[in-house]
Image (cartoon, rainbow, N blue to C red):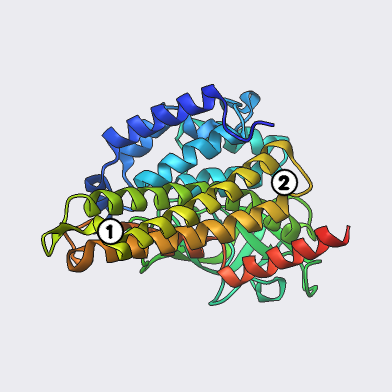
């Protein structure tokens, strides 16, 4: 059995790595990091020109219709380059939610614009600190009007529309939850920029005051649809994290092979060797789990929730560890603004929280393993 990508998919990876190596350097990331713009508009247009937005969008809706394996390949290279564009919020979350629960009219309305790069979308869930649960959702959708507040909305200041998790009735628990699509440029919507640990991925607080909203899916299915979308996004995000961890390992190795201390290359010291070896092992473990997730995602396997949780946990831990040890390998200079180590550390922290806290995914992993073993 072949667990690797095909030759065509590897060619796509090589092309993506070459393209991003030329168009998305750390100078590109720093420009967004230090500026007022939420993303690099030129890079966004160039990526759209490559057709990556529509990688997994069916051809009937203007996409390439290639599939999720190809999208995972692209995601890894975007993570390696720390691409400062709203790709994940638009493609992994908004587009996947529309594909999962949207009507034919909604798919025709949004998916072609996503595939062409003319549209930025996001997904708004959290209303306060901590994990999002059915009981924590207070935003309401009544009579096509949305009221409430969402926080930490990724790319929320630049998005054209958002899919919002809301309560369609006064019922408690999951039964009354639904999803709604809201035009963020319409009346009744106000946005406020929030500080983020990674300024190259800006966040927003969005307040809705009887804003016009379009229901997506049935009331009562909002939580299950959200969980499914997050599972799918977790796998694609895991590939971004693997790409970032791989880049950290390469940075640390290159520095260890050129930096001298006490008359010797620091790479010759056992302590540095152990750091690099541990980074490699963690990254490869995350990669294997991400591959498992890619298989489950591309085949629609019933193991998808388990694969998503495993990929999410291992990739988050691998990127977090690699970004920290990369800084440590660089020593004192690694903590300075001039060196790029901190860019990877900040992105690792942002991605680690973007789909919910680690404890939530660990609990899900344990639950899925227990269910699998009991079957």
Task: Name the one closer to the observer, 9 or 232.
Answer: 9
- Look at the numbered disc 1 and give the secondary structure of its residue: helix
- Across and down, in percent, residue 215 comes to 70, 52
Quadrant of the frame with the N terminus: top right
Structural crowding at the residue carrying mark 2, measured as other residues with C-alpha within 10 Å and reported as few (<14), some (14–19) or many (≥20): many
Residue 366's quadrant in the figure? bottom right
Numbered marks: total:
2
Q: How far, Cα to Cα, is label 2 from label 1?
A: 40 Å
- Across and down, in percent, residue 75 comes to 48, 42
Can residue 262 be seen here? yes
- Look at the numbered disc 2 and give the secondary structure of its residue: helix
Residue shown at 35% from the left, 53% from the top:
248
Structural crowding at the residue carrying mark 1, measured as other residues with C-alpha within 10 Å and reported as few (<14), some (14–19) or many (≥20): many
> Pointer 1: what residue?
341
Residue shown at 64% from the left, 32% from the top:
108
Residue shown at 49% from the left, 28% from the top:
10
- Across and down, in percent, residue 369 comes to 76, 62
Residue 199 shown left or right of residue 279 in the figure:
left
- Across and down, in percent, residue 221 comes to 78, 57
Residue 37 shown left or right of residue 238 in the figure:
left
Disc 2 and disc 1 in contact, CB within 8 angstroms? no
User: In this view, which residue lies farthest toward the left?
Assistant: 263
> Pointer 2: what residue?
101
């Amino acid at each position: 059995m072949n667990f690797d990508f095909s030759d065509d998919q590897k060619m796509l990876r090589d092309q993506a790595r070459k393209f991003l190596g030329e168009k998305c350097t750390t100078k590109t990331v720093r420009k967004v990091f230090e500026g007022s713009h939420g993303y690099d508009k030129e890079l966004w247009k160039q990526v759209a020109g490559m057709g990556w937005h529509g990688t997994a969008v069916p051809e009937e809706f203007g996409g390439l219709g290639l599939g999720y394996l190809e999208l995972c390949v692209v995601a890894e290279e975007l993570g390696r380059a720390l691409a400062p564009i709203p790709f994940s919020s638009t493609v992994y979350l908004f587009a996947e939610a529309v594909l999962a629960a949207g009507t034919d009219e909604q798919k025709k309305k949004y998916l072609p614009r996503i595939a062409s790069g003319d549209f930025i979308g996001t997904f708004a869930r959290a209303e306060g600190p901590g994990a999002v649960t059915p009981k924590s959702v207070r935003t309401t959708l009544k009579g096509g009007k949305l009221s409430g507040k969402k926080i930490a909305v990724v790319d929320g200041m630049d998005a054209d529309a958002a899919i919002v998790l809301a309560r369609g009735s006064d019922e408690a628990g999951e039964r009354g939850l639904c999803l709604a699509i809201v035009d963020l440029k319409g009346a009744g919507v106000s946005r406020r920029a929030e500080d983020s640990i990674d300024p190259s991925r800006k966040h927003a607080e969005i307040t809705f005051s009887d804003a016009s909203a379009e229901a997506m899916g049935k009331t009562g299915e909002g939580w299950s649809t959200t969980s499914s979308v997050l599972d799918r996004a977790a796998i694609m995000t895991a590939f971004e994290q693997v790409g970032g961890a791989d880049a950290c390992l390469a940075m640390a190795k290159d520095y260890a092979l050129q930096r001298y201390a006490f008359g010797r290359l620091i790479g010759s010291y056992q302590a540095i060797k152990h750091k690099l070896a541990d980074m490699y092992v963690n990254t490869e473990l995350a990669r294997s789990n991400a591959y498992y997730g890619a298989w489950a995602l591309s085949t629609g396997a019933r193991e998808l929730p388990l694969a998503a949780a495993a990929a999410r946990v291992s990739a988050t831990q691998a990127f977090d560890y690699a970004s920290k040890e990369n800084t440590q390998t660089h020593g004192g200079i690694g903590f300075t603004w001039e060196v790029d180590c901190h860019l990877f550390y900040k992105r690792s922290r942002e991605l680690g929280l973007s789909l919910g806290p680690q404890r939530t995914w660990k609990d899900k992993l344990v639950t899925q393993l227990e269910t699998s073993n009991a079957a």
